[in-house]
Amino acid sequence: MPKMKTRKSASKRFRLTGSGKLVRRHATGKHLLVQKGSSRQRRVKSSTVVSASDMPRVLSQLPYLGYLK
């Protein structure tokens, strides 16, 4: 059986923490920052954990992280 391919775009957007959670960046944090408030900019700068409802979709794109299921 051949190797399964990883979606490279997903592998660049998500990373695994030491405790086994998937971490992602917030959206809308790279441009048009003048019109966003400073508290919103601070919140967008940080990372957050992928929600449980999105985990099956993310893990289907990262086949070698399937042990997290």
Image (cartoon, rainbow, N blue to C red):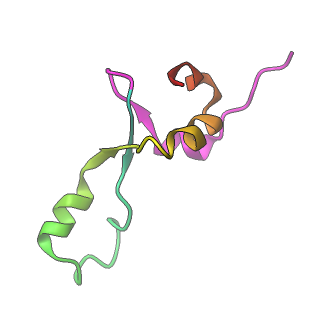
In the displayed image of the protein, which residue is found farthest to the right?
1
**Could you say which is closer to the camera, residue 50 or residue 24?**
50
In the displayed image of the protein, which residue is found farthest to the top?
1
Dominant SS of magenta comes to: loop
In the rendered image of this protein, does residue 60 appear above or below residue 9? above
Say whether residue 14 is left or right of residue 41: right
Say whether residue 30 is left or right of residue 54: left
In the rendered image of this protein, does residue 51 appear above or below residue 42? above
Residue 57: x and y in percent read 59, 43
What residue do we see at 63% from left, 39% from top? 61
Quarter of the image that includes the N terminus: top right
Say whether residue 2 is left or right of residue 6: right
The quadrant holding residue 60 is: top right
The quadrant holding residue 4 is: top right
Instruction: Confirm whether the magenta stretch covers residue 15.
Output: yes
Residue 45: x and y in percent read 24, 56
Instruction: Confirm whether the magenta stretch covers residue 37.
Output: no
In the rendered image of this protein, does residue 40 appear above or below residue 15? below
Q: How many marks?
A: 0
Quarter of the image that includes the C terminus: top right
**Start and end of the magenta stretch?**
1-20
**Could you say which is closer to the camera, residue 19 or residue 11?**
19
The quadrant holding residue 62 is: top right
In the displayed image of the protein, which residue is found farthest to the left?
39
What residue do we see at 40% from left, 43% from top? 50
Residue 43: x and y in percent read 20, 59
In the displayed image of the protein, which residue is found farthest to the bottom?
35
What residue do we see at 26% from left, 76% from top? 33
What residue do we see at 16% from left, 76% from top? 37
